[in-house]
Amino acid sequence: MSETPNPHILDADTMTGGMRPIRQAVLAIGSNLGERRDNVQGAVEALADTPDVTLVSVSAVYETVPVGAPEGSRDFLNLVVLIDTTLTVHTLLDRCLAIEDAFGRERAERNAPRTLDVDLIVVGDRIAHDDKLTLPHPHAHERAFVLRPWLDLDIEGEIPGQGFVADLIGGIDESGITKREDLEIVL
C-alpha cells in the first residue's frame, strides 16, 4: 500500500490497542436494479447499525443516468452519506461489501446494473492504493451523482488531491441528474 500520511495525525490503521481517532468518511450509495428506493434505504440503515460508525447526515435522493453501463440499463437512485468512524479503512470497505452482498449484489461485468453499490469516496485525508482499495475514489471528482449530493451536505467538502467539491462540480455535466423531491430516506 502506498500512502501519504500526515505525521501529526494518528493513523487508525496502524495504531494498536483500543484507542482510534474518529475520521469522517463520505460514502456514495446507488441502486438501479430491483426496488431501488428500498435498496438505498436499507444500505443507510445497515450503515447506521454498524458498530463504530455514526451516521452524520444523508443527502437527498437523486435519479441519475447510468455512466458507462450497458445499453438499456435503468437509471440509478443515488445519495451520499457522511459518517464518523473509528473503523480502519479496510474494515469499513469490508462492511460496505457485506452490505452490498446482503442486498443481492452480483459482481459481473464492469458498470453492470446492480441492486446496490456502496462506495468509499474519502475517509478523512487518507490516501491509499492497494489491490482492494483506492482512496480517494479514483472517479469521484468526475461524477455528478457523487458531487451534487455531497455538496448538498457539505459545502466545504474536499477530495484530497483533486480539490473542493464546490469547485469540481462546476467543471462537470449535470444534465443526467435529477433531485427526487418525492423520495426521502428515513433515519
Image: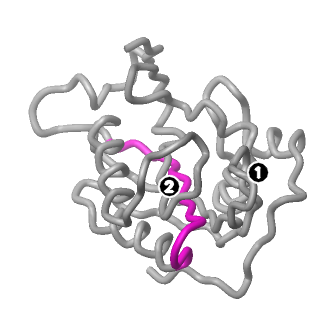
The residue shown at (60%, 83%) is 184
Q: To which residue does mark 2 refer?
A: 117
Q: Nearer the viewer, mark 1 or mark 2?
A: 2
Q: Nearer the viewer, residue 133 or 57?
A: 133
The mark found on residue 144 in the picture is 1
Q: Is disc 1 in contact with disc 2, using a CB cutoff of under 8 Å?
A: no
State the CA–CA distance, disc 1 to disc 2: 16 Å
- Position of residue 69 relative to residue 9, above or below, is below
Q: Quadrant of the C terminus?
A: bottom left
Q: On screen, 61 above or below 21?
A: below
Disc marking residue 85: none
> In the rendering, at what x and y percent does residue 179 appear?
77, 72
The magenta stretch is 22-37
Provide residue 177's location: percent of width, then percent of height: 80, 62
Taking the image as shown, residue 114 lies to the left or right of residue 83, namely: right
Residue 50: name its quadrant: bottom left
State the residue at coordinates (36%, 62%).
Answer: 47
Instruction: Describe residue 60's horizontal placement relative to residue 85 as left or right.
Output: right
Quick one: label 1 or label 2, which is nearer the N terminus? 2
- Amino acid at pointer 2: Asp
Q: Is 180 colored magenta in this rendering? A: no
SS for tag 2? strand
Q: Quadrant of the N terminus?
A: top left
Residue 78 position, x and y percent, is: 63, 63
Whether 15 is drawn above or below 152: the answer is above
Instruction: Determine whether, in the image, residue 11 is placed left or right of residue 62.
Output: left
Q: Amino acid at mark 1?
A: Ala
